[in-house]
Image: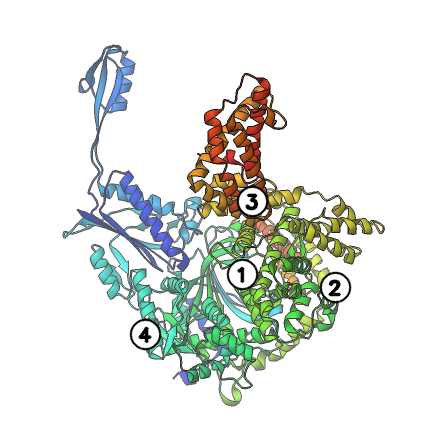
Amino acid sequence: MPDLLLELRSEEIPARMQRKAAGDLRKMLTDGLVDAGLTYEGCREYWTPRRLTLDIRGLTARSRDVREERKGPSTKAPEQAIQGFLRAAGLTDISEAHVHTDPKKGDFYVAHVVKPGRTTEEIVAELVPSIVRNFPWPKSMRWGAASGPKGRSYGGVEGRGGDALRWVRPLQSILCTFGPEGADTAVIDFEIDGIRSGNVTWGHRFLAPGAIAVKRFEDYAAKLEAAKVVLDAERRKEIIRQDARNLAFAAGLDLVEDEALLEEVSGLVEWPVVLMGEFEKEFLDIPAEVIRLTIRANQKCFVVRPSRPASPASRDEGGLGLHDGPHPEVRAERASNDALSNRFILTANIEASDGGAEIVRGNGKVVRARLSDALYFWKTDQADLPDLPSLKASGEKFGLDLEKPLDQRMARLDHQRVTFHARLGTQGERVQRIARLAEELAPLVGADPALARRAAVLAKADLQTEVVGEFPELQGAMGRKYAILQGEHPSVAAAIEEHWKPQGPSDRVPSDPVSVAVALADKLDTLAGFWVIDEKPTGSKDPFALRRAALGVIRIVLENRLNFSIDPFNDVQILRHQIGATPSKPEKLNAILSAAAAGGVFGQRARALIAEAKADAPSWLPLIDEHDPSISDDLRAFLQDRLKVYLRDSGVRHDLIDAVITPRSCNLLQIVRRVEALGKLLDTEDGRNLLAGTKRAANILAAEEKKGTRVADAVDPTLFREPAERALHEAVNQAGSRAAQAIEKEDFSAAMVALGALREPVDSFFEQVLVNDEDEAVRANRLALLARIRAATDRVADFSRIAG
Amino acid sequence: MASTNHSDPSRSFQGLILALHAYWAERGCVILQPYDMEVGAGTFHPATTLRALGPLAWNAAYVQPSRRPKDGRYGENPNRLQHYYQYQVILKPNPPDLQELYLGSLEAIGIDPLLHDIRFVEDDWESPTLGAWGLGWECWCDGMEVSQFTYFQQVCGIECAPVAGELTYGLERLAMYVQGVDNVYDLNFNGREGEDKVTYGEVFLQAEQEYSRHNFEFANTAMLLKHFEDAEAECRALLAAGAERPEGEPYRMVLPAYDQCIKASHVFNLLDARGVISVTERQSYILRVRNLAKACGEAFLQTEAGGFRPVREAA
């Protein structure tokens, strides 16, 4: 069967768009062919910076004829109707129609119409132009004379106005051949905006710029290869990967692998030639990550490191050959950080006439210029700021040590009043709130409050560093490095980096208590703030990544088994946002809020302090005194909702989650423990039977309550008639109090076991006792007993929400 | 012999300019002189901004001194200047072989594409102040960006029809590359050797030092703030005056109004360098300049150079 070859050749397509574009082309064309009634055996797409290519094998040569019957009017219909039918069916005379008989309608005409199949050439010639015109490029453009207005011509080319073709960059040529295997192929002829399809392509822009006539994929790929174009992106990647590894290996080095960069670089060349360049060793003073990003972002080059296991001597030479020798912490940092080598690997697009010497020289020059910028940034960040005197007030506000570089940066972040969000104030105000909350959370997560505060105060300082200004993705990581350099406690340094975590569902969750305190404080502050200004996520819109923040809170709490209620912290952080910066009597405010964080806004301690503060009547007092919990209720509901999503994603039955979550549950860990215990109970036969019994009890109760049947307020043992009633009553009493005790101790498994003991008495009750006794008092008493079952199980979970 | 040719583009900064002039003149461009106002880039020259609009064909090349007050480094940085030269080419509509023409220009200044790795790397250009954007590339030579290559899609907020191709060469950077010099001030300006040699530093170092002082320390911000307001008001006033014309006649005054738009833009850059514009204000200044540019662009379309045909002629 015949094969189809299509190539769309253009000016350089952005590397990041090539793979998807080739996939889109494949899908659009094969879908279109199938829709037109053709079949094919296989299709593969290829791409280079200058072409998208499809190789379709075993494509049918034409679509089948389609026969259909078209019903016409009755044989007795007026002439006009019959003429209309003839036109519609494409018949010339009514004798060409058949006559069918229907018992109800009588005789009527039927035309047997054959829709002839079309040739593949015809289909492709129609399909490709429409695909090209409607191609889903992320950004497309017009170009050349055709982009001129209609009615104007430029050098003989007519302007097409709004109809001008759009493509990602100017489309230069189209190659489209079709023909049976082993025989000659023919061009499928069509034209798009003056570009006529043909059987010609062009080789490498510089190395083989001539035109090449091709027949089919085999000679196309082979001729391109000879014309210095490697068509297959995967092969280009493999060439670059292997050559880069080999070059590194030959120099006693290891390539630092980078898949995303490899993908990009393979989209920048048609004929990859890998070369190695060099820069001065003093640049290795810069952290490895900064070197890597500098060389990668600006030059799209790979970095290399000394081969492992490296001899200590070579590592020293490679990484630490510096004059006065860096701080010991820096040595440690660098050793753990995979010291790089002072080489880099670049991928050129040509086999240069001098073997690449000029290319290496030129690239080295640019790399050096970029690294000297990076070195300058790195050194500047460790030096004093020029405007120190103006930072004093900010320094005092945060208890900063303005002798230290990172402290200075934090002071400047505050002093410059850098905005966090137009309605949520400055970064300085944000850091103040987070630091307070981190201190308050510290005792509950096992962190030293002073360290938590210090870490929170420095957590955002690196936003003011030059390196982070250049590479925002290094926020946190740079703060940690600068913190180590200025001698901060290791937990403080770690927390500066880890408080941003987890960034996504697969990111690591911090476990150092100081990191946990600051990470939680940061996220809770963000959530509280956006809740206060009512900027919550809606549908697919979550511009401030609040779902991610909530998931972060959930994962930090669960993975660190943090057993406390989030509510009071939401309350105080919401209050901090509502009260805003520079309140009157800040010491009193802080004391009250800290008490509220520890024991709730309505807790004894907070209330006592509020009562004390009433004498001065500070402006913020009513906000706390008459605290409106609706915002924090809503935030709690959001957290619960995210918890449900999280649990569901990790395979927990959603009905079990619904059964244990009540509007007031705000201890995330306990919700999960309840779900776990409930799941275990329901895995046992006792559990399943108990569930059935409880549901039966609940259903009967609900039905009777609906009818208005009286249910006794309390169970009266004197009204018992059957032993099963008495037994159930005793069992309910016992199970209820045991479960309550277990819950008190947060032992949900024990609570479930206690409930499990109800199974037998419940079953016997339903076997032996008829609830609807004729005696109204007995019936009301029995219903009260059923209510007791519901009350006992409700302590643990709402059984009515469980399926089955 | 190349060594006796004082205009050899690989040995002489002015030779580089002359070679580009000769190359583009040969390809039908009008060779213009720099616009006589302070601008941030060659694109601001009315020969690009305004001539990119409307249906008329237009091919031009020129050098444009460009001022970026914030980039001043008191003459101490080997790469950064507050005043430098751009070589600007605009071809409207862009010819189908614009990439080849561009590569030809590199060969004309001594860059052999079989020796050097020349690449077109995605870079979508946007000028918020001019309300302009286009798609194209950074052109790399051995990893260094030496030119910007853009197919204009929109200028002054107006769709370009036809599309113009714009090439912008960073002349100092290109010259440093072909001369093999690491410090811009060491560039050979006149292509002579020994006593007769004039370096870029001899021509411009003092200016860099003085203007850096001016831009960062001494420019009178109160006066500049007033100048911005004045330029904005004058631009609007001139456009309003130019709009007064008999029906069917072209707009009477756009270019002088556009000068005021350029002026406002440069004054804004100076104020920015002096650090008196806050982050939030910054956006609103940019928007004000853009609105002037848009108004000028729309008026330009109603002039003859913008393709407007007076009604009586057309009739």
Label 4 sits on residue: A246
Q: Which amino acid, mark 3? A: Gln
Compare residues A266 and A669 and report the one nearer the observer. A669
Left or right: B50 in relation to B220: left
* Closer to the eye: label 4 or 3: 3
Question: Considering the numbered disc 2 on the image, is that residue within a helix, a strand or a loop?
Answer: helix
Residue A620 seen anywhere in this rendered image of the structure: no
Instruction: Name the mark on residue A640.
Output: 3
Question: Of the numbered discs in the image, which one, if any, rests on residue A760?
Answer: none
Mark 1: amino acid:
Pro
x%, y% of residue A627?
72, 44
The answer to whether the residues at label 2 and label 4 have Cβ atoms under 8 Å apart is no
Q: Do labels 2 and 4 share a chain?
A: no
User: Which residue type carries mark 2?
Assistant: Ala
Residue at mark 1: chain: A
Kindly indicate whether the residues beneath marks 2 and 3 are on one polypeptide chain: no
Residue ID for mark 2 = B222
Going from N to C along the chain, the mark reached first, 4 or 3, is 4
Q: Chain letter for mark 3, please.
A: A
Residue beneath disc 1: A510
Q: What residue type is labelled 4?
A: Asn
Indicate whether A646 appears above or below B117.
above
